[in-house]
Image (cartoon, grey):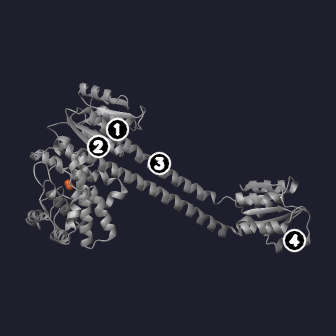
């Protein structure tokens, strides 16, 4: 667990017993701040960002939902959990559907379960924050790298002479970065270490002007070479022209300001070519860094996705094989219907995560083997909106939100959560719904054997055009006729057995 006692957890409940119990349960993980009513909780939030907020719904001052609404406005990423009395789940449902809370628990609380959920949500919020920080750092790096491109770098060859000191002083008034080397032998290393915009050669008999100018240009032809001579000499001036120097300066030297202006103009001459190269280079670097960051972000999302699927599988063994099979059937069905590769990939991801919202459904309801009461069924139904809310903040999952939210919609508008009908339900959603039903009907459960595909299709025929799309069911039948359905229905050999019955 990454949270340290420095992170604050806000607990609000008007029942002192529950407050104390929760404060003790989290004492090792967080710096716990407690509030005995809604107003106190809001005041705690106004003090600064906590790691998570866990509040009771029925409190004087402000309800838990109102406190969490406030928390969402101030700190959208902070995990928000609500506790309610077991006969007051309606408001919690509303809050879940509006995306105001991440989890809710009914009293009496299972403290261990609540603790696990808080730690898990905080950990996840931390890793997402770490990723955002990394991306910010990268952006900064890119900006400084571009800014660096406009500093003029001057390489000055010549020992400690008056000429050298004058050049250096003048260059520094224009904020050039000056690197000074004493002998021609030091030049190659200095040029290789840092591309110079301007190379100033203090001419004397010990240096080979021609060789050094060639060297500078062979490393970067845009480098401006300037020859600074002790006394004016026509032969030296001609030589300077011949070696491609852009300026020849000889005593008496201009004063510092004039010299600085002259150096700056010289450096600016090949500037556009040089800047273009530098920008290209920086762009290549920035692109590579961005690609790496994107890759890292994708890997993080994949890890998150896998963790979510594993968490759901651990709770509900039926889902384990189910999501894999629905993904397999959906993709094959999409292929049969001529969907392109991108849409097939969305189908796969959407099918894998279609029931992920069950993470937010209480065990006693999710895992109940018998018939559900209408209230329990309403709770089960929230898995569609909980799932969509869970994935909503993550860019990569945007394209599968309609599948996760809409996989229980029906063609005739009698489905949930949005009672969408007909064309309002996309082809991807229709494919996942039909594959979901087909797999559920053919799965063996403790209380009934799974149907053979033929029997399943008979049952499905009764709801074609009402619940399921005729074209999609046609494609599924085609797959079966081609002999490709059986292997898809048995992804893990035998189909997983589990207590969660499928409900239309
Ligand atoms: Fe579902
Ligand atoms: Fe399902």
Few, some or many residues within 10 Å of mark 4 (<14, 14–19, 20+):
some
Residues under labels 1 and 2: Cα distance? 21 Å
Viewer-nearest residue: 236 or 118: 118
Quadrant where the image shows the C terminus: bottom left
Q: Is residue 120 left or right of residue 190?
A: left
N-terminal of the two: label 1 or label 4?
Answer: 1
Q: Quadrant of ligand 2?
A: bottom left
The residue at which mark 1 appears reads as 119
Residue 237's tag is 4
**As displayed, is residue 461 above or below residue 8?**
below
SS class, disc 4: helix
Placement of the N terminus among the 4 image quadrants:
top left
Q: Residues within 10 Å of mark 2 (few under 14, many from 20)?
A: some
- Dot 3 or dot 1: first in sequence order is 1
Q: Earlier in the sequence, mark 3 or mark 4?
A: 3
Disc number for residue 133: 3
In this rendering, the label closer to the viewer, 3 or 1:
1
SS for dot 1: helix
> Of marks 2 and 4, which one's residue comes earlier in the chain?
2
- Viewer-proximal residue among 119 and 50: 119
What kind of element bears circle 3?
Answer: helix
* Rendering coords of residue 160 (x, y %): 86, 52
- Residue depicted at 43% across the width and 32% down the height: 6
Above or below: residue 377 compared with residue 200: above
Q: Which residue is mark 2?
A: 69
Q: Are marks 1 and 4 in contact (CB under 8 Å)?
A: no
Mark 1 touches mark 2? (CB < 8 Å): no
Q: What residue is rendered at 75% in x and 58% in y?
A: 189
**Image location of residue 467, percent across then percent down:** 13, 63
Q: Could you tell me if the residues under marks 2 and 3 are in contact, i.e. CB atoms within 8 Å?
A: no
């Amino acid at each position: 667990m990454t949270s340290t006692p420095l992170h604050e957890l806000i607990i609000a409940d008007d029942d002192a017993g529950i407050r104390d119990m929760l404060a003790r349960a989290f004492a090792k993980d967080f710096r716990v701040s407690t509030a005995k009513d809604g107003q106190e909780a809001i005041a705690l939030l106004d003090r600064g960002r906590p790691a998570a907020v866990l509040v009771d719904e029925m409190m004087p001052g402000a309800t838990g939902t109102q406190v969490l609404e406030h928390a969402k406005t101030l700190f959208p990423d902070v995990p928000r959990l609500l506790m309610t009395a077991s006969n007051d789940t309606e408001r919690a449902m509303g809050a879940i559907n509006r995306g105001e809370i991440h989890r809710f628990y009914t009293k009496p609380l299972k403290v261990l379960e609540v603790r696990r959920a808080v730690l898990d949500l905080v950990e996840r919020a931390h890793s997402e924050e770490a990723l955002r920080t990394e991306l910010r750092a990268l952006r900064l790096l890119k900006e400084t790298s571009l800014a660096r491109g406009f500093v003029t770098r001057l390489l000055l060859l010549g020992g400690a002479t008056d000429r050298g000191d004058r050049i250096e002083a003048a260059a520094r008034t224009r904020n050039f970065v000056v690197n000074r080397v004493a002998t021609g032998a030091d030049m190659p290393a200095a040029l290789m270490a840092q591309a110079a915009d301007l190379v100033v050669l203090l001419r004397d008999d010990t240096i080979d002007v021609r060789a050094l100018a060639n060297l500078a240009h062979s490393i970067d032809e845009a480098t401006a070479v300037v020859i600074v001579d002790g006394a004016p000499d026509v032969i030296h001036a001609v030589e300077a022209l011949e070696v491609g120097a852009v300026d020849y300066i000889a005593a008496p030297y201009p004063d510092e300001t004039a010299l600085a202006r002259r150096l700056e103009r010289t450096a600016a001459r090949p500037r556009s070519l040089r800047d273009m190269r530098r920008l290209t280079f920086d762009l290549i670097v920035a692109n590579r860094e961005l690609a790496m960051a994107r890759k890292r972000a994708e890997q993080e999302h994949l890890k998150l996705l896998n963790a979510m699927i594993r968490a759901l599988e651990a709770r509900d063994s039926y889902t384990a094989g189910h999501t894999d099979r629905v993904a397999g059937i959906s993709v094959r069905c999409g292929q049969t219907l001529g969907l392109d590769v991108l849409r097939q990939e969305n189908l796969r991801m959407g099918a894998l995560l279609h029931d992920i919202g069950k993470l937010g459904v209480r065990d006693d309801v999710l895992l109940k083997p018998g018939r559900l009461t209408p209230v329990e069924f309403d709770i089960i139904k929230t898995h569609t909106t909980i799932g969509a809310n869970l994935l909503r903040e993550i860019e990569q999952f945007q394209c599968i939100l309609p599948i996760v939210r809409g996989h229980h919609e029906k063609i005739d508008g009698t489905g949930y959560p949005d009672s969408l009908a007909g064309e309002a339900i996309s082809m991807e959603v229709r494919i996942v719904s039909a594959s979901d039903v087909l797999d559920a009907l053919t799965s063996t459960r403790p209380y009934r054997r799974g149907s053979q595909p033929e029997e399943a299709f008979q049952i499905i025929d009764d709801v074609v055009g009402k619940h399921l799309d005729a074209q999609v069911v046609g494609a599924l039948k085609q797959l079966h006729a081609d002999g490709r359905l059986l292997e898809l229905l048995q992804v893990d050999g035998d189909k997983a057995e589990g207590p969660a019955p499928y409900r239309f």
